[in-house]
Image (cartoon, rainbow, N blue to C red):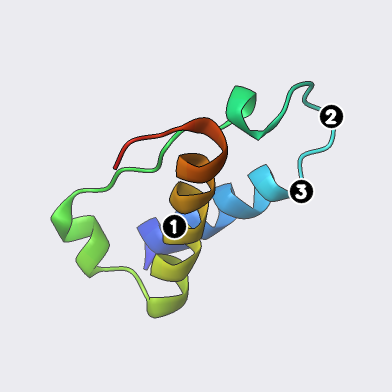
């Protein structure tokens, strides 16, 4: 649960960040996890990770 909680914390911090100059693409990068880390995530954590990466694909041209 430690990794999942850390991931959610990072995503929440990125979503609430208002002091960093630049858009989403300037301050974000794709979140990539190992298969064992993905297996340990809850459904909500997987949903948040996928939403972040899909936003990056749409806005920044990230490749899967």
- Circle 2: element type: loop
The answer to whether 32 appears left or right of 8 in the picture is left
On residue 19, the disc is 2
Cα gap from disc 3 to disc 2, whole angstroms: 9 Å
Residue 46 versus residue 51 in the image, above or below: below
- Identity of the residue drawn at 79% across and 21% down: 21
Is there CB contact under 8 Å for labels 3 and 1?
A: no
User: In the image, which is nearer the foreground, mark 2 or mark 1?
Assistant: 1
Residue 9, horizontal then vertical, whole percent: 58, 54
- Identity of the residue drawn at 26% across and 68% down: 40
Cα gap from disc 2 to disc 1, whole angstroms: 22 Å
User: Total marks drawn?
Assistant: 3
The answer to which of marks 3 and 1 sits earlier in the sequence is 3
The answer to whether 39 appears left or right of 6 in the picture is left
Residue 50 versus residue 17 in the image, above or below: below
Task: Name the quadrant containing residue 27.
Answer: top right
| Residue at numbered disc 1 | 49
Residue 26, horizontal then vertical, whole percent: 62, 22
| Residue at numbered disc 3 | 16
Residue 38, horizontal then vertical, whole percent: 25, 61
Cα gap from disc 3 to disc 1, whole angstroms: 16 Å
Task: Name the quadrant containing residue 4.
Answer: bottom left
């Amino acid at each position: 649960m430690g990794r999942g909680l850390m991931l959610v914390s990072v995503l929440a911090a990125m979503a609430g960040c208002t002091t960093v100059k630049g858009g989403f693409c300037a301050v974000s990068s794709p979140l990539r996890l190992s298969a064992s880390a993905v297996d340990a995530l809850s459904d909500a954590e997987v949903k948040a990770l996928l939403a972040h990466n899909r936003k990056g694909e749409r806005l920044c041209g990230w490749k899967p």
